[in-house]
Image: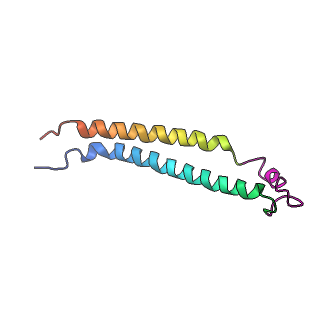
Amino acid sequence: MNKMTNAPQTKYPYLLTALGVALMAVTEIYSFVRTMMMRAMFQAGGGYGSYGSGFGGARQFGGGFGFGLTSILTTIAVIVATVGVVWLGLTLRKPKSA
């Protein structure tokens, strides 16, 4: 009697869900760090720019860190995680064959 009949069928849904969650975590951490760096750059006397204004430092990064990229990656990560969870739920819902 094999208790793990669904194990091969649930491997890919688990991996897809884990990939989506991991990608979401990475983009959220990157977004948080980027926000803290931008806040430090624009504070008076933050060490970037000339004469303590803070605005000169933004030019060395090309005017920002790519604000659109993380939101697109986060959206893709949410979609991947949602598809993985739905696929996993449908796989686990199937009746086990003996």
Task: Verify whether residue 86 appears in magenta.
Answer: no
* Quadrant placement of the C terminus: top left
Q: Where residue 11 sits: x, y (%)? A: 32, 46
**In the shown orientation, is residue 77 left or right of residue 30?**
left
Residue drawn where x is 50% and y is 48% of the image: 23
The residue at the point 27 percent across, 46 percent down is 8
* Above-or-below relation of 49 to 94: below
Q: Note whether 50 is above or below 23 in the view shown.
A: below
* Segment tinted magenta in the rendering: 47-64
Residue 61, relative to residue 94: is it above or below?
A: below
Residue appearing at x 63%, y 42% in the figure: 69
**Quarter-wise, where is residue 49 in the image?**
bottom right
- Please tell me whether the stretch drawn in magenta is mainly helix, strand or loop: loop
Indicate whether residue 55 is drawn in magenta.
yes
Foreground of the two, 66 or 40: 40
Q: Position of residue 9 (x, y in %)?
A: 28, 42
From the viewer's side, name the closer residue of 37 and 22. 37
Identify which residue is drawn at 81% across, 63% down. Answer: 45
| Residue at the farthest right position | 51
Return the x and y of residue 62 as percentages of the image width and height: 78, 48
